[in-house]
Image: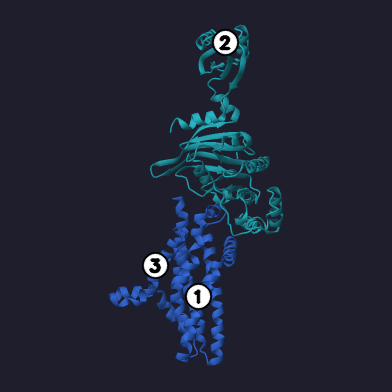
Chain colours: A blue, B cyan
Amino acid sequence: MLNIKHIFFRELRSLFDSPVAYIVSVVFLGLLGWFFTSSLFLANVASLRTVFEMTPFFLLFFGPAMTMRLLSEEKKGGTLELLVTKPIMEYEIVVGKFLAAWMLFFATLLPTLVYFLTISFLGKIDMGPIIGGYIGLMLVGGVFLSLGVLGSSITENQIIAFIVSFLIVFVLFILDKILVYFPGDIATILEYLGVDYHFSNIARGVIDTRDLVYYFSMMGLALLVGTVMLEKRKW
Amino acid sequence: MSINVQNLTKQYGTKKAVDDISFDVHSGEIVGFLGPNGAGKTTTMRIITGFLASTNGTAKVEGFDIHEQQMDVRKSIGYLPEHNPLYLDMNVLDYLEFAAQLQHVEKGKIPHRIREMVGMCGLSSVKHLDIGQLSKGYRQRVGLAQAMIHDPKVMILDEPTSGLDPNQIVEIRNLIRQVGKSKTVLLSTHILPEVEATCDRALIISNGKIVANGTTKELQSQFQGSEHLYLEVEREDGVTPEIIRMQLKTIPTVENVECTHELDSSLMFKVTAAKDVDLRKQMFQFCVQKNLSLLELRREQTSLEDVFHELTMEKN
């Protein structure tokens, strides 16, 4: 546990010391702010629906961008050799880095609370979907970021890491939108695998264990594969 | 026994990078791991440190098996990988702290250990700078400092002086010798004077096999076939190189004589003696007897360089 903490804090510091974190956050918030304000007065409803609808879509790009360098840079620079020859397990490295990226995503979401404050002055808000929405966003973010860590673990090239992660999260994202092309049984399975399907449940304010199991097992699986990719050098 | 390697083999496809090697490094010894590039030095070190796994065979570090007790092995080793990878965006103090944390140095002792390393490795003038801003020599010191932060019993250094300028090389060698007083050091290099300057013993590896093992003196004498003398005499009228050559050959301890240079004013000979015979006195007397003016008399012994060359070239 202690090792995870050390990796986490080093990574977090490195994220916030470099311009990457700020660029990603500012661009993300800029885009989201544009979509939020441009539709707010047209819809005339005091809700954060735009935030919850657009963020998973933006995360398709921003998730892989936040995570692409996490492991690939260590591979390329040779610092991975320093890390793994210390008394530390590979999974501790992977988990520590993933948590740092998750933290960055959390920090990026924080300023959107300003929207919440704004609309709370404008009208009566239903709290359930908002709390559920934020929890859901963190979970979707967790899945996308863990898959980003996985993409970063397979290569020392950041661009390849980005593209691979993007492809994986893109498939998960569109699964519940292409169900019409599949027969019933398969469609049910695919729907369950889709990230957005579970998100829409939680965003309604209903926190179901089935959805939580889905999110956490996706994260666990992605990080497990990422760990195996780091151990692959020993085969 | 500090490091004990038993029948270690590492196979990549059909090529054996390390081929069934065994060797020991005793506590407190500084051993140079010598070999041409691609001989298997780095692979061997990476297996010992746990970065790679062996195909066959095992090794023990401070009594801990590299397969069974990996975490204990890693705690006993201070490792400086090849090319000295560092986090360029961290400053020196933060980096040393991070290294100490990962090596499970007690929290209360970390500031003290960092101060000690900064002093020992001469980092006090750069300790607040980012590692990316440092020169190569300073980076190498940071690499050594992180490797020693937990006061390990064993140091494994992969080409610790590569890419440094001559002054920096001397500094790093001094540091290694100083460290070697209390620790076991295994360092790899392809620079021969380095072994002569810093190590108690050398292991020469070629094509994944250990081809020689001993102190530099032992290796020199072991591979010393014969000794050469270079003799230069003034040229005199009526004396041809052939005459001198024949005369030299009559000396019983002389095995072979060659005339290497025929200059206008002088003649040079390469005289090969039988093993373990010092011919210098006889050569001088020979010149006196024959009334030749001796211009130069030079003895050449087998250097470690020759040993290395002989051992690693013949198979390639």
Image quadrant holding the C terminus of chain B, namely top left
The residue indicated by pointer 1 is A28
Q: Secondary structure at mark 3?
A: helix
Callouts 2 and 1 close, C-beta under 8 Å: no
Image quadrant holding the N terminus of chain B, namely top right
Which-is-in-front pick, marks 1 and 3?
1
Q: Tell which subunit mark 1 falls on.
A: A
Which-is-in-front pick, marks 2 and 1?
2
Instruction: Sort mark 2 into few (<14), some (14-19) or many (20+) by Cα contacts within 10 Å.
Output: few
The percent position of residue A131, horizontal first and vertical second, equals 52, 82
Answer with the quarter of the image where residue B17 lies: top left
Would residue A105 be visible to someone looking at this image?
A: no
Q: Are marks 2 and 3 on the same chain?
A: no
Q: Tell which subunit mark 3 falls on.
A: A
Which mark identifies residue B89?
none
Of marks 1 and 3, which one's residue comes earlier in the chain? Answer: 1
Q: Residue at x 55, y 35 (%)?
A: B203
Quick check: B271 left or right of A147?
right
Report how far apart the C-alphas of labels 2 and 1 lie in the structure: 93 Å
The residue indicated by pointer 2 is B236
Report how far apart the C-alphas of labels 2 and 3 lie in the structure: 88 Å
The residue indicated by pointer 3 is A167
Q: Secondary structure at mark 1?
A: helix
Who is closer to the viewer here, B64 or B50?
Answer: B50
Quick check: A33 left or right of A183?
right
Going by the numbered disc 2, the residue's amino acid type is Glu
Q: Residue at x 41, y 69 (%)?
A: A169
Q: Residue at x 45, y 54 (%)?
A: A232
Going by the numbered disc 1, the residue's amino acid type is Phe
Which-is-in-front pick, marks 2 and 3?
2
In the image, residue A6 sits, relative to residue B113, either above or below, namely: below
Q: Secondary structure at mark 2?
A: loop
